[in-house]
Image (cartoon, grey):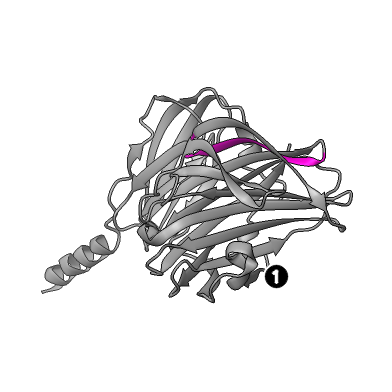
């Protein structure tokens, strides 16, 4: 009887620490890859997973799987993907990769203004987000510090629904930097039901020197299927000709826009989505407005069904270039 009890205790403890190996499906060990690098890994039974690059932690998620993009500088890198069970058991998968052709490098890892989705003081509206600032009233909400789904353990959820061609707009003021004129605006986004979205808008704006520069961008999902930028003087969207297909439901996407204010106008210079960079050259004059400040904004445009759209933003940051 005593031996049987010991066997049962052993089996019980073993079951508590049963943790599957870390399986990495992307990137391929030994591969030469462009940056940002798409990491996909899982370890069933884990409560947390972490990615190390050259023995430095670069990503943490409280889940048994991860799907994220990480920007690393050119060169060879030692990568480790590690998982933990509820009892502290550890599994690790170590391998090497080479990063080639990366012009952004470590700027993406340490933005000058980081994790903006966690900032207090977000504002929102619905009617002001419509055509001519007079759209239909639309139910909308925002929830911060979402642990799942999240890449950092603290994403922000945005929701809009219930109105045909309605919209929800959210923005955050992040202070003035009149001395800075070149920017890289980056974030990770995820949409749960993209089939209900007409478009998704990602904006950054600056007031400096008596002018307001509108760096308005949108993924025009249902109409042109391209990235469009905002023509301030004519109050209309202009297609860049660069494709922007409907994002896959429930999948994280890494987005980076590069802008500059020059010659009294807003200059859109490039867009990078999931590692695919496209140089562009669109310039539109700014308009007169006082004050000093930067702000970022996110907008959900509903389609003709008015059905709900839920989106998440994570790793929202601005790098001064």
Q: Please give the name of the residue rendered at 17% of the width and 69% of the height, measured from the top-left corner.
A: 8
Seen from the viewer's position, the closer of residues 49 and 216 is 216
**Left-right relation of 235 to 5:** right
Q: Please give the name of the residue rendered at 41% of the width and 69% of the height, measured from the top-left corner.
A: 306
**Left-right relation of 51 to 203:** left
Q: Please give the name of the residue rendered at 52% of the width and 50% of the height, measured from the top-left corner.
A: 188
Q: Position of residue 191 (x, y in %)?
A: 42, 58
Q: Tag 1's secondary structure?
A: loop
Which residue ends up furthest to the front in the rendered image?
A: 234
Q: Please give the name of the residue rendered at 64% of the width and 50% of the height, measured from the top-left corner.
A: 317
**Left-right relation of 285 to 230:** right
* Residue holding disc 1: 121
Q: Main secondary structure of the magenta part?
A: strand
Q: Position of residue 139 (x, y in %)?
A: 50, 77
266 is within the stretch colored magenta: yes
Does residue 293 appear anywhere in the picture? yes
Count of numbered circles in the view: 1
Q: Relative to 288, is 16 above or below?
A: below
Q: Position of residue 17 (x, y in %)?
A: 30, 59
Quarter containing the N terminus: bottom left
Quarter containing the C terminus: top right
Q: Quadrant of residue 15?
A: bottom left
Does residue 152 appear anywhere in the picture? no
Seen from the viewer's position, the closer of residues 249 and 66 is 249
Seen from the viewer's position, the closer of residues 44 and 261 is 261
Q: Which residues lie in the magenta part?
A: 264-275
């Amino acid at each position: 009887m005593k031996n049987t009890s010991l066997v049962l205790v052993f089996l019980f403890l073993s079951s508590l620490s049963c943790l599957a190996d870390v399986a990495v499906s992307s990137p391929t060990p030994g591969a030469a890859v462009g940056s940002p690098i798409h990491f996909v890994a899982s370890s069933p039974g884990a409560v947390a997973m972490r990615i190390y690059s050259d023995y430095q932690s670069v990503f943490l998620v409280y889940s048994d799987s991860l799907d994220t993009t990480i920007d690393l500088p050119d060169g060879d890198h030692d990568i480790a993907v590690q998982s933990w069970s509820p009892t502290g058991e550890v599994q690790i998968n170590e391998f090497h990769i080479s990063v080639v052709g990366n012009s952004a490098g470590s700027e993406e890892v340490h933005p000058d203004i980081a994790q903006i989705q966690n900032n207090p003081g977000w504002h929102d509206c619905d009617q002001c987000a419509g055509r001519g600032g007079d759209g239909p009233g639309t139910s909308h909400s925002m929830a911060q510090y979402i642990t799942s789904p999240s890449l950092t353990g603290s994403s922000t959820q945005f929701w809009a629904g219930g109105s045909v061609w309605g919209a929800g707009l959210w923005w955050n003021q992040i202070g003035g930097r009149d001395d800075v004129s070149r920017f890289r605006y980056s974030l990770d986004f995820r949409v749960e039901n993209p089939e209900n979205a007409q478009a998704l808008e990602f904006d950054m704006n600056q007031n400096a020197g008596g002018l307001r520069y509108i760096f308005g961008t949108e993924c025009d999902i249902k109409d042109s299927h391209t990235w469009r930028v905002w023509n301030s003087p004519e109050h209309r969207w202009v297609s860049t000709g660069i494709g922007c297909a409907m994002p896959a439901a429930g999948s994280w996407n890494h987005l980076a826009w590069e802008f500059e204010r020059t010659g009294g106008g807003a200059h859109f210079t490039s867009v990078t989505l999931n590692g695919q960079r496209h140089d562009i050259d669109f310039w539109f004059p700014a308009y007169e407005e006082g004050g000093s400040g930067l702000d970022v904004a996110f907008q959900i445009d509903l389609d003709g069904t008015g059905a709900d759209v839920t989106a998440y933003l994570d790793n929202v940051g601005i790098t001064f270039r």
